Amino acid sequence: MWMTELPPFVPFFIAALMVLISSGWPRNLVLLVTPVLAGLYLWLDVTPGTVLTVPIIEFELVLMRADRLSLLFGYIFHIAAFIAAIFSLHERDTTQAVASQLYVGSALGAVFAGDLITLFIFWELLAISSVFLVWARHTERAIRSGMRYLVIQVSSGMLLLAGALLQYYQTDSLTFDFIGLEGISGWLIFIAFGIKCAFPLLHNWLPDAYPEATPTGTVFLSAFTTKTAVYALARGFPGTELLVYIGAVMTVFPIFYAVIENDLRRVLSYSLINQLGFMVCGIGIGTALALNGTVAHAFSHIIYKALLFMSMGAVLYRAGNIYASDLGGMYKSMPKTAVFCIIGASSISAFPLFSGFVSKSMVLAAMIEEGYDYIWLVLLFASAGVLHHAGIKIPYYAFFAKDAGIRTEEAPLNMLIAMGIAALLCIFIGTQPSYLYALLPWEVEFWPYDTTHVLTQLQLLLFAVLAFVWTNKIGLHPHEIHAVNVDIEWLYRKLLPDAAAYMYGVYKRIGYDFIESAHASLKATARTISRTRPGRFHLAASWPTGSMVLWIAVILGFFLLADALY
């Protein structure tokens, strides 16, 4: 069919233009129809092995390179775009509508890019389009965090471009396949991917920006940027053992921030980093089982994380705040949203019969198979932490902890429909994992519902629940209060600016003292000279300007006459 020559990003870029010039129900129709038609095209017409290239100067850019890995990410991106579009139907903000379509299209362009230059182009478009979803909230905090977000994301693109150019210089190829860490180019690209994947010490843009976005913007943001980075790592660095240890750290450190955080959308942001850690570990292991687990977990994570962000977005939309200390008892006003939130919490906690269980267990099984026993224990601890801060804390403090006296309406119908679709998918994938396994890039010889996996996970979840109840009962659990938690961003938001201001003050003070000292020395020297005999000589006196001009003219005339004579 003719559409097989159409790169997957094109329908969303066209939709962005149509959304820009339309309003009301035509705009909503475009937002809903685009992911459906584009998704059907991808499912029915694009097959593994499809390639579309465009020659530019001496390069041949691969705008579409389809295989089972890129296609699976393409499928879930269309599903996420459709769910997020339904959730955003109540919005009348043209900026958000246009930015969301460009954002989805950029993610698809990056996933299907077959060369590093094409990847770089969409990598930067991904950053530029997504920042408007943060700025769309129009608060000072959103503007400032959006600027920091943009600087970091664009920096990632610059590193990617530098790595791509070095790669071309070294290998005379720009193909985007396995890269590895053999040279400087590989490290530059690795760090570029790591920034977008929220590696430790490079992560703070995520909990800084995502909670400041609009309720609908955060749903889009949760689905695309970091998963595009996971895809890029799976494509370029599978089997890189360093990723196992990076991923293990990613699973653990966000737990402590999430436990003490009061902003529930920031809790989910830290939880997102935790879940990315499981995927990064799977990429680092690099076996077929591990990579299948990574891709499956990315697939299911997009859905259940979007569900959790939608439920908290609905609470923010109705209650006007999202702080755990100020909420409670919302189940009385928003019972359907509470049920959907619990389903999302069960999925992220990897309860059997929910989507997180059938994907996370693949990564854990691969970890044991490859002999990473201690890392496996770290991931078990991280799994318990997930239940604590995302599985229990989110629904408990938002809906049940106490009655804060907030009485609102239930979430708008479009929000409920979007959450309902995501909740059904979480249950369907959890109860019928074979459908997801059939789409995975490598052959699957794994079944999660055996006695060992189920009992291990249930025991882990039971002890995590008991730990939460016990720490609350004896008062050890951190209280939910309004506070600023210090993260790595303290270095560039506090320490470095303060150090720069101090150094400037020192420089200014030293420079001022030096100038004053030099000026005083010159004045003293001038006074000393004026008192000496040469100082009283006539030629040393101040002459009128006219006299100086006259004598200069006389001297010049003398030299001209001498030159003419000799």
Image: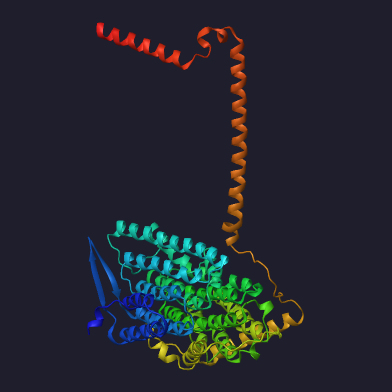
Viewer-nearest residue: 197 or 458: 197
Q: What's the coloring here?
A: rainbow
Instruction: Locate residue 73, reporting x and y percent.
Output: 39, 79
Instruction: Locate residue 183, reporting x and y percent.
Output: 38, 58
Q: Is residue 511 above or below residue 190?
A: above
Q: Quadrant of residue 334?
A: bottom right
Number of marks in the rendered image: 0
Q: Is residue 285 visible?
A: no
Q: Is residue 315 left or right of residue 60?
A: right
Q: Is residue 433 above or below residue 296?
A: below
Q: Is residue 190 left or right of residue 480?
A: left
Viewer-nearest residue: 239 or 31: 31
Viewer-nearest residue: 250 or 417: 417
Instruction: Locate residue 399, reporting x and y percent.
Output: 65, 86
Q: Is residue 188 left or right of residue 170?
A: right
Instruction: Locate residue 519, reporting x and y percent.
Output: 59, 26
Q: Is residue 485 left or right of residue 54?
A: right
Residue at left offset 39%, top offset 57%: 184
Q: Quadrant of residue 337?
A: bottom right
Residue at left offset 53%, top offset 12%: 541
Q: Quadrant of the C terminus?
A: top left
